[in-house]
Image (cartoon, rainbow, N blue to C red):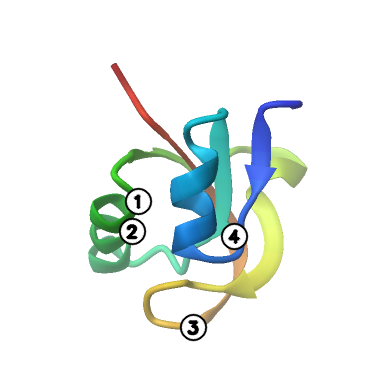
Amino acid sequence: KGHIFDCYTLEDAKNKIHEGIARISWCGDQECGLAMENAIGAGILGIPEGNLGKGSGNCPICNKHTESTVIISKTY
């Protein structure tokens, strides 16, 4: 859990993936997911189960309110 960072902007997530895993709000729309991956330069790993996948915020692409978060990381 020490390497999972809560992020609120795409720029913040882009900076944090070099230190671990970025956790950011996502509306669940595939187009927004692809845009996030392209902007951050990392892949969406999914919406985690339990409390880690929950959080109130807005999708950084479409600004739609959501109660879900996604984790994003570089994959090798």
The quadrant the C terminus occupies is top left
Residue 28 lies, with reference to residue 4, above or below; the image says below
Give how far apart the Cα atoms at labels 4 and 2 are.
15 Å
State the separation of the CA atoms marked 1 and 2. 6 Å
Indicate the quadrant where residue 55 lies: bottom right
Residue 22 in the image, given as x and y percentages of width and height: 55, 43
Q: Are marks 3 and 2 in contact (CB under 8 Å)?
A: no
Q: Decide: marks 1, 2 in contact (CB < 8 A)? A: yes
> Which residue is identified by label 2?
36
Q: Secondary structure at mark 2?
A: helix
Q: Which mark is residue 40?
A: 1
Amino acid type at image mark 3: Lys
What residue is disc 4 on? 68
In this rendering, the label closer to the viewer, 1 or 4 = 1
For the point 23% across and 66% down, which residue is it? 31
Q: What is the spatial separation of the Cα atoms under label 3 and label 4, in whole angstroms?
A: 11 Å
Pointer 3 residue: 64
Considering only vertical position in the picture, is 20 above or below 17?
A: above
Q: Earlier in the sequence, mark 3 or mark 2?
A: 2
